[in-house]
Image (cartoon, helix red, strand yellow):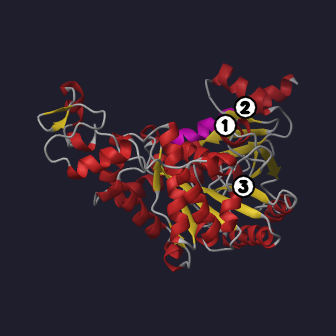
Amino acid sequence: MNPLAQQLNETLQQETPAVYDMLSSLGKAIYFPKEGILSQSAEAKAKANKYNATIGIATENGMPMHLKVIQDTLSAYNPKDIYEYAPPAGKPELRSAWREKMLKDNPSLASIKAEFSNPIVTNALTHGLSIVADLFADAGDAVIIPDKNWENYELTFSIRRNAEIVEYPLYNEAQRFNSEGLKQALLAQKNKGKAIVILNFPNNPTGYTPDLEDGDAIVAAIKAAAEEGIKVIAVTDDAYFGLFFENSLQESLFSKLADLHSNVLAVKVDGATKEEYVWGFRVGFITYASSSNAALAALEQKTLGVIRATISSGPHPSQTFVLHALKSPEFEQQKAEKFEIMKKRANIVKDLLDSGRYGDTLQYYPFNSGYFMCLKLTEVSADAVRKHLLDHYGIGTIALGETDLRVAFSCIEAEQLEELYDSIYKAVQEVSAKA
């Protein structure tokens, strides 16, 4: 094993032995090279005041070389903030700005006993989850998710890392979050001694976020598993964070998980992708919590090792664009305006479905946040309805399993929602008539 990896492992063994035990074989072997192109280039950048012939970019007239046809469309930005490589951990100013945003959006973070790392920039959230998988998932490890989930978890954790996906029902009989189901799924891993739990709120595909009481029950379930000796990597997938339209959790559960138990490692994966409506920018973040700063530093080095080995570093222009937005005095107001648009759409959908105009035909799962909602079609195949909507109405939806039809109200104008749901209702009736 490389001495740098061994040194990081020894730090984790000494500072947070449970976290060391959580690491996958790759997680134990990975490290960020201190002697190499990046480290030597960084040293040269600080000291080479005459000629710097280290890193592989081209320069001209003291600036990164660039094409005028590109720079003309980006003239508001200095070439050095666009064309150079960003550091593997991300633009330092952006990391600091995102940390400040996290504290503002999650006030309880200020009062936790544990520390949390400076957010590390990822190539959006999928990359952040992939880093979690690389660092902590080995073949056969349990990855616990609800039965209503984002399909990419299967690819990221099971297909790539051969982990075992363990599902529990998202809702209980009272149509609230099924914290008991989560608890039992966790306790069932006692023989393995380890579990990765992914908490995705607002949930994709249902647009559901638990309330405060259920949030506490989720934390209690994870603590119960930790007290039984199960080492839990608790990952909050906060892709749609902030889009909370009703009485639900208003903060990430990361705050409550950060110093929960020595057998719990809290990991927050979030980003500008959905929060700031910049899907194509691919700017995300991964953040760890620990009682040990040395352990946080070791986890950061291992994370940088994964980044260096996969994408090397994230795109610089989009990091600059997001940083510019976060620093703008107009940012909060503009974001609030978009929030109100999204909330209005969600409320219109709920009013339509609760109006009685569709009878019992369009039943739906509880939703109160995010981009989506899910219909529960009990009499017809969801995929048959999906295809009928495409072929006869020119309407696209997503079928999930036999009964569930996901509708993204996020991309439908408010005045178009009535026609959309009326069309879905007609399609269900027409498919039912053919059956």
Pointer 2 with pointer 3, Cβ within 8 A: no
Q: Is residue 418 magenta?
A: yes
User: Residue 268 location, x and y as percent?
Assistant: 57, 59
Q: Nearer the viewer, residue 415 or 153?
A: 153
Q: Nearer the viewer, residue 137 or 38?
A: 38
The local crowd at label 3, few if under 14, some if 14 to 19, many if 20 or more residues have their Cα within 10 Å, is many
The amino acid marked with disc number 2 is: Lys
* Residue bounds of the magenta highlight: 410-424
Q: Which residue is mark 2?
A: 426
Closest to the camera, between mark 2 and mark 3, is 3
Q: CA distance from mark 3 to mark 1?
A: 41 Å
What residue is at 81 percent from the left and 60 percent from the top?
193
Q: In the structure shown, which secondary structural element does the residue marked by tag 2 occupy?
A: helix
Q: Which residue is mark 3?
A: 196
Circle nearer the N terminus (2, 3): 3
The amino acid marked with disc number 3 is: Ile
Closest to the camera, between mark 3 and mark 1, is 3
Could you say which quadrant of the image residue 347 lies in? Answer: bottom right
Q: Is residue 397 above or below residue 122?
A: above
How many numbered marks are there?
3
Could you say which quadrant of the image residue 417 lies in? Answer: top right
| Side of 104 where 12 appears, left or right | right
Query: Is residue 359 visible from the viewing direction of this image?
Result: no
Q: Which residue is mark 1?
A: 422
Which residue appears farthest toward the left when viewing the image?
61
Magenta span: chief secondary structure: helix
User: Residue 235 location, x and y as percent?
Assistant: 64, 57
Circle nearer the N terminus (3, 1): 3
What residue is at 35 percent from the left and 59 percent from the top?
333
Q: Quadrant of the C terminus?
A: top right
Q: In the structure shown, which secondary structural element does the residue marked by tag 1 occupy?
A: helix
Q: In the structure shown, which secondary structural element does the residue marked by tag 3 occupy?
A: strand
